[in-house]
Amino acid sequence: MTPLLSVIVTVYNKAPFVKRCVNSALAQSYHNLELIIVDDGSTDNSGALCDALAARDSRARVIRQGHMGVTLARLAGTNAARGEYIHYVDGDDWLEPDMESALMAALIETGADMAVTGYIDTRGIHHPAGSVPAGTYDRAALERDVFPYMMESRGEGTMGLYSSLWTCAARKGLIAPILRGVDPRIRSGEDGLCLYGAVAGSRRLAVVGGSYYRYCPNPTSVTARPLPGHFGNLELLMDGYLRSPMAGIPSIRRQFPNKFWYHVLRGDTLARRSGKPYSAVEREQRGRVAARIQALERDTAILETSIGGVT
């Protein structure tokens, strides 16, 4: 019998999108799945829509909680999941019919702990999982061919592995402890912390060719607008990376500064688009973040010199 896959859809005020998302999960060609819809305290009619959609299929159920953010919503779904594997889905996106079949085939055939694939944007453009070529990577290959490049980015869509958690399915035993270790106060960037942490903890990774996830940018989401407390959030995110096992892998740690600078520049861009200058508190936070990144850059340079190059 094929393994059970738990598809966890998180929903917060997604009424215009949730029907499309849920129906796409239930229409997957991979049938041995359960669908857990986590209503994270929606104040629109998302909850009622979720109930009606779940009532149509015995594989689906709804969990409710107060509005606590995506990390705790995912964690609630994870704690309730019965599947050996987990795939997280955002409630405003949807799936191509064969997405779960492609991910599960890769996991089953290769014995991988995690499988990642690409996505399709609103223009219909297909994006691969990243610049890391499709294939199966055992631990030695991960350390040689994936770890040194997985966070590298030269612009949107060119990073080694795309940082959104919805691009992957992973063993529950791998992803659940990582998710539990994420500070729930982090409101942006937690996807990369989880995905890269899971890659770093994998014994084997499958990178699946093709693009199966339909990403629908939502102008009200925290990734599309200036986030109040952006640099306070970034400090928490930096703490998460630096306290994770990734910080002990030199080839990954050396990518942290560029990763953090990306978030600084993204905050600057969103603030500039909003037309609202930083407050005195935000300027102070930005300065503190920049100083931390510069110190990390110096430490990284010293480390690389002491070991004769990147490992």
Image: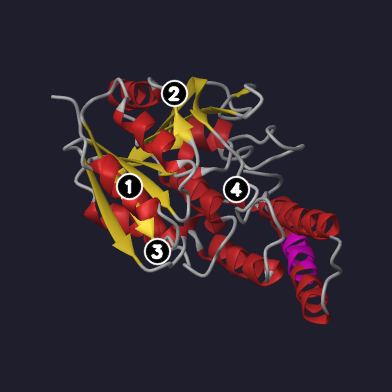
Residues packed near mark 3 inside 10 Å, few (<14), some (14 to 19) or many (20 plus):
some
- Rounded to the nearest angstrom, the CA distance separating label 2 from label 1 is 20 Å
Identify the residue position indicated by label 2 in the image: 96
Residue 3 position, x and y percent, is 20, 31
Identify the residue position indicated by label 4 in the image: 252
- From the image, state whether disc 2 or disc 1 is nearer to you: 1
Q: Secondary structure at mark 4?
A: helix
Please provide the residue range marked out in magenta. Answer: 290-299
Residue 260 vs residue 29: left or right?
A: right
- Residue contact at pointers 4 and 1, CB within 8 angstroms: no
Question: Which is nearer the eye, 78 or 54?
Answer: 54
Residue depicted at x 86% and y 69%: 277
Q: Which quadrant of the figure has residue 275?
A: bottom right
- Rounded to the nearest angstrom, the CA distance separating label 4 from label 1 is 40 Å
What's the residue type where badge 3 is placed? Answer: Gly
What's the residue type where badge 1 is placed? Answer: Cys
- Rounded to the nearest angstrom, the CA distance separating label 3 from label 4 is 36 Å
What's the residue type where badge 4 is placed? Answer: Ile
Residue depicted at x 27% and y 44%: 52
- Rounded to the nearest angstrom, the CA distance separating label 3 from label 2 is 27 Å
- Residue contact at pointers 2 and 4, CB within 8 angstroms: no
- Rounded to the nearest angstrom, the CA distance separating label 2 from label 4 is 32 Å
Residue 15 position, x and y percent, is 45, 48
- The number of callouts visible is 4
Sequence order check: which comes first, mark 2 or mark 4? 2
Residue depicted at x 37% and y 49%: 175
Q: Which mark is residue 41?
A: 3
Sequence order check: which comes first, mark 1 or mark 3? 3
- From the image, state whether disc 3 or disc 4 is nearer to you: 3
Identify the residue position indicated by label 1 in the image: 50
Q: Is residue 294 magenta?
A: yes
